[in-house]
Image (tube, rainbow, N blue to C red):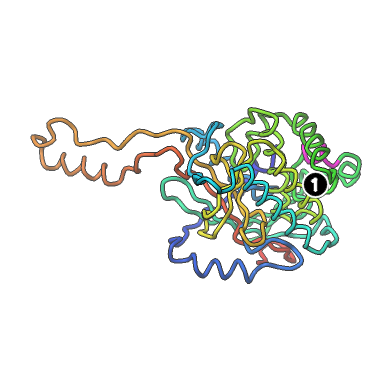
Amino acid sequence: MNDLEELREFRAELPYPERSRLTPGRTRLLSAARRPPRRFPAPRWNTRLLLPAAAAAAAIVVAAGAVGYGLSRGSTGSGQRAYAPGQPSQATLAVRVLDDASAAASRVPPRAAPSPGQWIYSKFVTYEYPDRVTSDEHWITFAGAKATYRGGRWVVHNAPITPPADIARDPLGAFNKNATPQTAYYALASLPKDPRQLLATVAKAAEAFGAAKLGASTPLGGSTPRNKGQLEFDYLSLLLSNAAAGAGAPPAAEAAAFRAMGAIPGVTVQRGIADAAGAPAIGVSDDGGYDQLLLNPASYQVIGQLARSTENGPKSAGLPRGFAKLPRAQQQQILRKMKTAPPPLRKGTVVFSVAYQQVSEVSGPGVR
């Protein structure tokens, strides 16, 4: 079972304050909480978070519901900026942004991978259309063990844990069988540094994983890759997302992954957007902007995902015929329903977004 699917069992929804009030302070917090040498600001799945072992499960739950919003693969984007003559094309801009992301990763000092038993705390914010915002916390180990609080004590769930020998023998195969921060870390580390060779290796691993399974396992879920470029992009996004929920990817491997993403035909970027926590973000997409991998615009760290509707939803119903002749109590009931009904869904509307608020190594479950 993929970790994205398992997360739903451990999700605890908490009420979350209004984003507009918390954005300034959260932005400062994300900057201050960045822990060197790790490239993760203080960000945020899961539930569909891009995520990995523990942070990725909530995303699938939402993803399944997102299909009803029209989240199938689209051929053109929505919400993308129009570029006037003389401005860079989307393809050129995407290459520039991903080259910058690659350069930023290359500047991060390398460090040893955490031990399999190292505990990792993650907190993330999830937005669901039209106005549902929740905050979730998770504790997992680098190897993928999860902890839940039951009966006044922490219970650790150790299975499934991928044997180190399997990871060493076939890192990508180990990730395909069990997506955890550890298997994602070593799968990325095993990829070639040359963009063409990297994409060829990724395409082979993605085909072995299965396009349908990949579509359901990515943080945004619900959409199956329709061509080779989308298959490569989604698989790399899944690797980067799972690694981001742990120790992050090895800097050199992450740099190579971003550089290869820029070589995939059809990849676009959108600047000037925000993640679920209200922090600035850059959206990177392989389907015109409907499903986006979110990057921090300063550090280029992976900080979440975002999904937009690919079609218009039903418009809000107007007053029924003969409304003026209805009893006053019935009129008030109709007006109350109209007032609380969600606004009509427009093509390009954000229907789901998830952001990491904090990811840090801790001494054990319950420790922040």
Q: Residue at x 46, y 40 (%)?
A: 348
- Element carrying mark 1: helix
Q: Quadrant location of residue 285?
A: top right
Could you tell whether 248 is left or right of 274 in the image?
right
Bin the neighbour count of mark 1 within 10 Å (Cα to Cα): few under 14, some 14-19, many 20 and up.
Answer: many
Residue nearer the viewer, 117 or 122? 122
Q: Check the image and report above or below for 137 versus 214.
A: below
Q: Quadrant location of residue 315?
A: top left
Residue 100 inside the magenta-drawn segment: no
Image x and y of residue 257, in percent: 75, 47
Q: Which quadrant is home to the C terminus?
A: bottom right
Which residue position is annotated with label 1?
188
Residue nearer the viewer, 61 or 100? 100
For the stretch drawn in magenta, the main secondary structure is: helix
Could you tell whether 70 is left or right of 119 in the image?
left
Residue at the limit of the structure toward the front, as seen here: 86
Could you tell whether 273 is left or right of 268 in the image?
left
